[in-house]
Amino acid sequence: RKEFTFKDEIVKECQEVLECFDNPVALHIRRGDYLINSGNHHNLSLKYYEEALKYFPDRQVVIFSDDPEWCLEQLLFVDDRFIVSEGNGPYHDLYLMTKCSDFIISNSTYSWWGAWLADTGTVIVPNVWFGPNNAHKSLKDLYPSHLFLIPFSLFLCLCIYLTLYTDLRYSVSIKILFLILLWNLVLIQSDIV
């Protein structure tokens, strides 16, 4: 990380924007080429962002995107806690992203770099990174265990295990609660890890 630093001019030009930050969550939305090349790139749904935002209720959220106009039109982001980064270059946005406290990243190396360079907080990641043409590619090196949130699918497996394979130490009511939780997790499993 020491090798990857931002030029002083970028840091200086971002100082005014940083004064508006209040322990923000960085949220990245990639559209652009992902919309026209969905065979190689998975397009994340707004449901992914809606579910991920539940981890950060009442927190300031700075949205970084290659399509800020689209972001401004989405009802999900109308609350005053949302700030859409507009008019900055990609280097400025990346620097600003690294100054956030937590992260909801898209399936994009741009936001991955922002979270990795920041080296702080919780990072919510999508479980589908590639489109169908690249679905066979491994994500093993993409999600370092020291940086990212425990994958949602592992939590799902834990709930299945506790529901089906625990001995009688757990009452029937506890198992029913796990089944309800499991059902809710299945409903939102489509995009969140």
Image (cartoon, grey):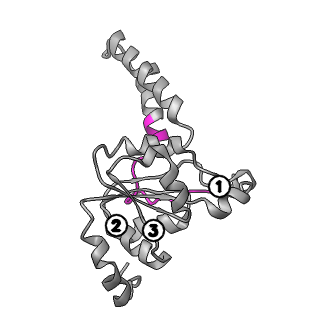
SS assignment at label 3: loop
The structure residue drawn at horizontal position 38% and vertical position 88%, both measured from the top left corner, is: 7
Residue topped by disc 1: 130
Q: Which residues make up the magenta segment?
A: 138-155
Crowd rating for badge 1 (residues with CA inside 10 Å; few <14, some 14–19, many 20+): many
Front-most of residues 81 and 34: 81
Q: Which label sits on residue 119?
A: 2
Q: Position of residue 64 (x, y in %)?
A: 46, 63
SS assignment at label 2: loop
Disc 1 residue type (three-letter): Phe
Q: Distance of mark 3 from mark 1, alpha carbons? A: 27 Å
Front-most of residues 88 and 45: 88
Q: Earlier in the sequence, mark 3 or mark 2?
A: 3
Left or right: 91, with 25 as reference point: right
- Is any atom of residue 4 visible in this view? yes
SS assignment at label 1: loop
Q: Position of residue 6 (x, y in %)?
A: 38, 84
Disc 3 residue type (three-letter): Glu
The structure residue drawn at horizontal position 50% and vertical position 48%, both measured from the top left corner, is: 74
Left or right: 80, with 94 as reference point: left
Front-most of residues 6 and 153: 6
Q: Is residue 140 magenta?
A: yes
Circles 1 and 2: CB atoms closer than 8 Å: no
The structure residue drawn at horizontal position 41% and vertical position 64%, both measured from the top left corner, is: 115
Location of residue 92 with respect to 68 vertically, above or below: below
